[in-house]
């Protein structure tokens, strides 16, 4: 069976590691990046089924990253995770192929559900 | 010539004129020479004050030659405004026979001087008054010295309410009544006692340090608590001055004491008010930081929840990997501690302080302030670089208040660089011979001199929503720590603020 691959962009090392552990327990494989620039700067980005992007990143923020990815023609679904979500973020997100905007702290089981949803749709 | 010598001389003249003149009447030459030999000025007048005799002493004292003044009114020796007073003196002499005192007189060249004067009534053989004779001596120098001594005495008595003297074993050998009274003792009760009975045990080390400094430097001043005879305490200020015997050997010291309780209480009250204001300001800072803080606490909670569910899933699947689980549990406890640390920092930051100073590492304070503001800095995209001195920088300080200053400055810097192209903040700490220095630089807008001049004033702000209290409170805090805070515009734009704080003493 194909193991779904999730790319995690999160600058907080502990949060990043915790998502990796969580997703591995749920049989996802992962690649972690600590910033949007780090992700975009990689030449051979692995194929992935879903992007999990933290909103508050050093440099470009999560939404700007997704905007860039979207502009590059990627159709990969993304989930944005933010400490604080305002309505304009939601509006921007809805036109950028973002399947969910989640507010921290996220219930881990909900996170898994959202990732599965994003991949299946 | 001392005052008593002057008096002796004048009374001798009085003896000669009163008793011997009748016997010497025939020898006018002798009489005239006798008067001219008197060092003091001798001036005789008729009853209207017209000068009839002007001796050599008078020529020296007033600068007029005899020929210039004979027949003129003697009021030339006082200012015109004093002429009436001069006539009043004659009236008194006429009634009582003499007048004695000191008053200001006038030299020919217009300079004024103080003279000690005796004016006597001159009578003829039948006892009829025929004129006056005045004997004057310049006492200006003497008077000045006396006044200086009086002022000095007054100053000492006012500045220092009590005076005592101790021998080189620290026992009282002389105690002025006021000194004893301040301490609640009778006038002689302290004689022979050791100084230790007048200082509470907790303060004796401080007093001893002052004593050592006095032995070393000849004098020392210190403040400590005093213990009264009934056991109650007050704050006293002491000035210790080393004393020596005739051979120049140290034989004890003077102890000048004043009660500074009222001043200490006023200072304590002021400190309390300042602390309250600083506390209110911290609470308001905290209010502004709350969104960032919520995010900061969310991070570890988010991680903990993920780790915990990952572990649950492994267990539920019946295929747990022990090494994995151990690692996950380590992560969970690390993150719980991290959340706890954030809470601790915040609680420390908003707590009320008692104003008690302890030895604080400035580097650690900067680190804590930096951590509190990291979420805000991150949100604004500001990069904060810490260049902290490699060794701990110990300063005597109220830790919470010091952190408040650093938080204020860093927050200002973050606000200054927000929306700027370059958003860099540099923080340095270093130690010099005399002090510990903290500096913060930002790449904010160019700052004008008028802003730099006023930036530490209360209610001065360049921010639309600011109250203008942050830097004013920061300055109050720095200054109450004996430090200096300064701002300067950087030539390439932005602001540099430096703080210098006195070092903790090595023996603390």
Image (cartoon, rainbow, N blue to C red):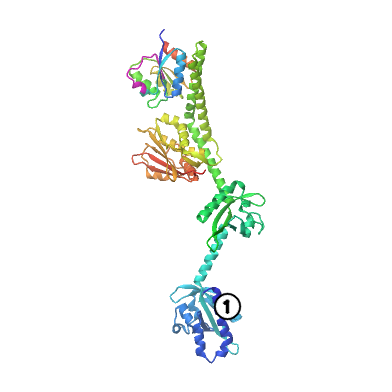
Question: How many numbered circles does the render carry?
Answer: 1
B174 versus B32 height, above or below: above
Q: Identify which residue, B328 or B488, lies in the foreground.
A: B328
Chain label for disc 1:
B
Q: Residue at x 53, y 38 (%)?
A: B279
Which residue is farthest bottom?
Answer: B26
Q: Residue at x 49, y 81 (%)?
A: B73
Front residue of this view, candidates B40 and B86: B40
Query: Which quarter of the picture shows residue A39?
Result: top left
Q: Position of residue B347 (x, y in %)?
A: 53, 33
Magenta residues, dominant SS class: loop
Instruction: Specify whether A8 is left or right of B287.
Output: left
Residue B314 position within the rendered picture, expressed as x and y whole percent measured from the top left? 50, 13
Residue B151, compared with residue B358, is above or below; it is below
Q: Nearer the viewer, residue B170 or B190?
A: B170
Any part of residue B142 in sight: yes
- Residue B162 seen from this side: no
The image shows residue B3 at horizontal and vertical percentages of 54, 73
Residue B366: x and y in percent read: 46, 36
Q: Is B56 on the left-hand or right-hand side of A75?
A: right
Which stretch is magenta? A38-52
Quadrant of the rendered structure where residue B68 is? Answer: bottom left
Indicate whether B74 appears above or below B400.
below
- Asked if the magenta segment contains residue A46, the reply would be yes
- Residue B473 colored in magenta in the image: no
Callout 1 crowding tier (Cα within 10 Å): few <14, some 14–19, many ≥20: some
Q: Nearer the viewer, residue B34 or B140?
A: B34
Query: Residue beneath label 1, please?
Result: B99
Which type of secondary structure does the marked residue at label 1 adopt?
strand
Residue B392, compared with residue A79, is above or below; it is: below
């Amino acid at each position: 069976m194909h193991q779904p691959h999730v790319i995690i962009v999160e600058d907080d090392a502990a949060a990043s590691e915790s998502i990796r552990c969580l997703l591995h327990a749920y049989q996802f494989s992962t690649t972690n990046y600590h910033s949007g620039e780090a992700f975009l700067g990689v030449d051979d980005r692995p194929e992935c089924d879903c992007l999990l992007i933290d909103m508050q990143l050093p440099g470009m923020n999560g939404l700007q990253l997704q905007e860039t990815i979207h502009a590059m023609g990627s159709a990969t679904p993304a989930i944005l995770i933010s400490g604080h979500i305002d309505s304009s973020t939601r509006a921007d997100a809805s036109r950028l192929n973002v399947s969910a905007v989640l507010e921290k702290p996220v219930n881990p089981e909900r996170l898994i559900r959202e990732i599965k949803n994003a991949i299946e749709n | 010539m001392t005052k008593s010598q002057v008096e002796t001389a004048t009374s001798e003249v009085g003896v000669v004129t009163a008793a011997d003149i009748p016997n010497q009447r025939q020898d006018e030459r002798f009489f005239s020479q006798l008067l001219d030999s008197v060092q003091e000025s001798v001036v005789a007048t008729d009853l209207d004050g017209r000068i009839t005799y002007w001796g050599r002493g008078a020529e020296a004292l007033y600068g007029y030659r005899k020929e210039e003044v004979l027949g003129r009114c003697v009021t030339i020796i006082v200012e015109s405004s004093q002429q009436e007073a001069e006539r009043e003196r004659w009236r008194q002499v006429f009634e009582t026979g003499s007048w004695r005192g000191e008053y200001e007189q006038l030299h020919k060249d217009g300079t004024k001087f103080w003279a000690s004067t005796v004016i006597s009534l001159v009578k003829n053989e039948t006892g009829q008054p025929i004129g006056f004779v005045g004997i004057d001596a310049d006492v200006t120098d003497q008077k000045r010295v006396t006044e200086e001594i009086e002022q000095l005495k007054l100053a000492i008595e006012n500045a220092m309410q009590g005076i005592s003297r101790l021998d080189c074993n620290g026992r009282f050998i002389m105690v002025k009544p006021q000194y004893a009274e301040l301490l609640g003792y009778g006038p002689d009760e302290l004689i022979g006692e050791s100084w230790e009975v007048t200082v509470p045990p907790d303060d004796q080390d401080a007093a001893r340090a002052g004593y050592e400094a006095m032995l070393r430097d000849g004098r020392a001043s210190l403040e400590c608590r005093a213990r009264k005879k009934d056991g109650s305490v007050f704050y006293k200020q002491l000035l210790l001055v080393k004393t020596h015997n005739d051979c120049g050997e140290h034989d004890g010291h003077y102890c000048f004491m004043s009660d500074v309780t009222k001043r200490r209480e006023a200072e304590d009250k002021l400190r309390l008010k300042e602390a309250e204001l600083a506390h209110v300001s911290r609470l308001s800072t905290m209010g502004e930081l709350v969104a960032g803080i919520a995010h900061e606490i969310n991070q570890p909670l988010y991680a903990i929840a993920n780790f915990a569910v990952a572990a649950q899933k492994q267990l539920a699947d019946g295929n747990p990997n022990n090494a994995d689980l151990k690692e996950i549990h380590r992560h969970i406890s690390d993150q719980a501690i991290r959340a706890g640390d954030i809470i601790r920092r915040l609680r420390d930051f908003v707590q009320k302080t008692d104003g008690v100073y302890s030895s604080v590492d400035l580097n650690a304070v900067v680190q804590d302030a930096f951590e509190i503001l990291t979420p805000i800095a991150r949100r604004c995209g500001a990069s904060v670089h810490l260049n902290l001195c490699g060794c701990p920088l110990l300063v005597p300080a109220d830790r919470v208040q010091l952190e408040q200053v650093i938080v204020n400055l860093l927050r200002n810097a973050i606000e200054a660089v927000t929306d700027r192209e370059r958003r860099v903040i540099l923080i340095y700490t270093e130690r010099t011979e005399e002090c510990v220095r903290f500096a913060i630089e930002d790449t904010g807008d160019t700052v004008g001199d008028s802003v730099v001049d006023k930036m530490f004033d209360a209610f001065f702000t360049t921010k639309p929503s600011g109250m203008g209290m942050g830097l004013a409170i920061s300055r109050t805090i720095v200054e109450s720590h004996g430090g200096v805070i300064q701002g300067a515009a950087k030539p390439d734009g932005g602001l540099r603020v430096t703080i210098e704080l006195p070092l903790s003493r090595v023996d603390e």
